[in-house]
Image (tube, coloured by chain):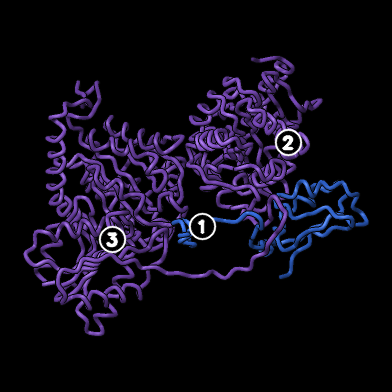
Chain colours: A blue, B purple
Amino acid sequence: MSKSVIEEFPEIPIRKKDVLTTEPTASWRVERPEINLDVCNRCWLCVDYCPDGVISKTDEGPVIDYDYCKGCGVCAAECPTKAITMVLERW
Amino acid sequence: MGKVELISGNRAAAIGAKLSRVQVISAYPITPQTPIVEYLAEFIAKGELDAEYIHAEGEHSAIAAAVAASIGGARAFTATCSQGFAYGFECIAQAPGYRVPLVMAIANRTTGWYWSLQPDYSDIMPGRDLGFLITFCESVQEILDSIIQMYKITEHEKVQLPGMVSFEGFYLSHGTEAADIPDQAEVDDFLPPRKILPHVVDPELQPTEPFYLIEPWQHTIYRHIFERTLDRAKGIVEEVTKEYAEKFGRDVYGLVEEYKTDGADVALVSMGCLTTAARRAVDAMRSEGKRVGLIKVRFYRPFPSEKIREIVEREGIKALGVVDRAISHGAGMGPLGQDVASALYSLKSRPNLIDFVCGMGGDDVNVDDFRRALNRLLEIADKEGVKELEFIEHPMKPERMLKTFENKLIAPGYNSCPGCGAILAFRHAAEILGKDTVFWYPPHCLGVANPQTAAPILLANFAAGAAYGRGLYRAYKIKGRKTRVVVFAGDGGTVDIGLQSLSSAAEAGESIFFICYDNEAYMNTGIQRSGSTPLSAWTTTTPVGPRWRGKREERKDMLEIMIAHRIPYIAFASPAFMRDMRGKIEKGAKVIDNREGLAYLHIFAPCPTGWRSDSNTTIQLARLAVQTGVWPLVEVDHGVFRLTYKPKELRPVEEYLKLQGRFAHLTAEEISSIQKIVRERYQKLLEMDGKKLF
C-alpha cells in the first residue's frame, strides 16, 4: 500500500505520547533544596506545591529529582516542619 | 546635531515615533514587536511624549483604533506582526480606503503554520496588495529614519495612503546597534505637523465624510486612482528620503540601494537584514575578481520596477538571484521573485532568474549561503531562459541531553520560570483530567514552557481558544467519543482577546472546560497590562513615572461576566488551597462529562517574574490573596453561589501587596483605597453566599 502524504514526510512533527521526552533543567538552579528526613513529617505538601513536579512520594519520604529541580524554594518556604533547607549550589 | 546611542531596533522604532510627535498610539503586545509599545508607554509615563495611549484588547481593535485616530486627523502609530497582523487584517485593509497616513511598524515574525517567534515575511506579504507603502529595513538606523520619513511620505498631499515600516524580529528588533538619534528640533523642521485635508473627519473644522459605500462601477476606477497614486509616490519617496539623507547626513535613501553593481554579470536582489550577509558575500567574491553585485529593495510598495530594469540594462546583468524570505505557496515562487520577474517582463533581453527561498521562521542565512547563490548565478549566467526556484535549507540534528518518562501524565522539564504559578495549576489539571483529554492553548507562557503531557496539547489562535474547543468537542460528539476538551488559557486569552469566543461558547452551552490561569498581565510577551491587571499595578505598558502610577483602572470582574452567562459551573481557585482547587477541577470535569454545558474555572497564578516577587513566595502570595480578600474562593454550582473558604477576618491587603515589586510605588493612601475596594467586594460576595443566582 502506498504511504499517505503524512507518512511520506517524517519530518512533519507528530509526537508519540506513550513516552514523554524532556530536557533537564538542573542548570537553572542557584540553590538546591535538601530534605532532612528525620524532621520531615510526611505531610507531602512539597509534592503538591512544587511547580515543576520534581518531588515524588516514596516509602522513604519525599525524593527530589535534581535533574529537573529549578531551585525556586517553594518547597522550603512551605514546609511546615522546616525539614527543607536551601543550600547554595556549587556547580 | 543628534547623538549616537546603542539601541535596539524596537527602541529605534519607538524613538522614531516619538520624534515624529505621534499623537495617538494604539498598542497590543506580540513578540517581537512588544518593546516598541513598552518604550512608548515609558516615554508618556515620564512626560517625554504627550500622546494618547490606547491599551487595546487585541490587534483587531488596536489597528482599528489607530486607523480611527488617523481618520480623526491625529498622527497615529501602531505596531504589530505575525498572528497580530493576520488578526487585524480587515482593519489593516480598511486603512487605504480611508486614505489615512497611518504608520505601522512591523517587527516581522512568521505567521502561524509551524509556530516560531522568529522572522520571515509570511506576516507582512499578505498585506502587500492593499495600497500601503512598505519599506524594509536593514539596520537599526534605517528603522529610526524610516519611521520619520514614512510620516512625511504618507502625509504628503499627493499620497495620503498608509505605510508600513518592516524589519526582521529579533535580528533587528532586539539586535542592538549604534544609531544616530536626531534632535527633536531638526525633526520638527523636517516633519511639520500633519496637514488636515478635506477627507479628515472633524465636524468642528469641516463638514465632510469620506463615504464608505460606493457603486460597483466606481470600484475599478478607485483602484486605478490608488495605483496611479502609488506609482506617483515613487518620485515622492526618492525626494523625501533624499531630503532626509542630506539633512541628517545619511547615505541610504531612495527606492533601491545599489551595492557594487558596476559591471556586474550577476546580482542578488534582497530586502531587510539578510542584505548585510549578502553584501559580505559580494565583497568576498569581488575581491576574487568575480563580477557580482547586489540590489537592495528598500521600498517594496510601490515596487521599484523601473529602477531594477534600469540597473539590469545599464550593467548588462545576465542573471538575478532573488533572496525571498517568503513563498507564495503553489505559485512556484516567492512574492519578491514574482515582483522582480514581473518587472523584467518588458525587457527585450531578460536576465536569467533564480528565486532563492530562505530564512523561513528565523533560519539564519549566512555569507556562505550567498556565496553559493552567487556562484549558481555565475553558472547559469550564459544560459537562456532560466527561471528556477531553489530552497536554501540547513538540516541539522540538535544535540541535547534528554530524559524519557513512561506512564506519566505530565513530565518535568518545562521552560517555565522558577516558582511559576501557572504551570503548577496546569500540572494538577493534567494529572486530574488524565489521558483522554485534549488541551487547547491559546498563546500563553505554557505554550513556550512546552510541558510534555500524555494528553495531546494543541495551539489555538489567541482570540479563538473557546472556538477551537467547540469545534473539537463537536467532532468528538458526532463520533461518540467521551474525550474531554479543555481550553487552558491565560488571562489575556480569557478576559481580553479571548472573551468573545468564550462568551459565545458559554452561551451556546458547549460542554467544554475553560480553565483560565490568571497571572494578571501578558507575561508571555513580558509583563504588559491586561484587563485582569489589578488597580495600580506596575506593568511595562502601565509604567510608573511622573505622569502615570501603574494601572489606572480596576480589573474586569470575570465572576460577574460568567454569572451573566448562566453556565452550569463557575469557580475561582488558588493553588495555595490545593484540595479546594483540585476539587473544582474535578467538578468542572464532571459537568462536561455529563454534557451539561460549559464549565469555567479561574485559577490565581502568582508570577515571580512579572510581579517582581521572590520565586519562593508563590504559595505564600496565593494564600495571602485569599486571606486578604483580594482573591476570594468562590463557586457558582448550577446557579448556587458559595464562598468555598471564609476567613474569620480578612488580613490587611498591605501584607499581600508589600511582597511584590509591582506595588512597591504605592503610597499609604493608594493602599487604603485598594483596601476599601477589596473589602467592599468581599462584603458583596458574603451577602451573595448561599443564594441561588439563576
Q: Position of residue B347 (x, y in %)?
A: 8, 62
Task: Name the residue nearer the viewer: A1 or B484.
Answer: A1
Residue located beneath label 1 in the image: A13
Task: Name the residue nearer the viewer: B446 or B557.
Answer: B446
Does B446 sit left or right of B433 as displayed? left
Distance between mark 1 and mark 3 Cα atoms: 30 Å
Q: Nearer the viewer, mark 1 or mark 2?
A: 1
Residue located beneath label 3 in the image: B271
Q: Position of residue B162 (x, y in %)?
A: 25, 41
Task: Say which amino acid is labelled 1.
Answer: Pro
Task: Name the residue nearer the viewer: B547 or B363.
Answer: B363
Of all residues shown, which one is farthest toward the left?
A: B348
**Crowd around label 1: few <14 · some 14–19 · many ≥20 (10 Å):** few
Query: Can you see residue B466?
Result: no
Task: Say which amino acid is labelled 2.
Answer: Met
Q: Label 2's element?
A: helix
Q: Label 3's element?
A: loop
Residue located beneath label 2 in the image: B581
Instruction: Give the answer, above or below, for where B35 lies relative to B506.
Output: below
Q: Nearer the viewer, mark 1 or mark 3?
A: 1
| Label 2 close to label 3 by CB (< 8 Å) | no
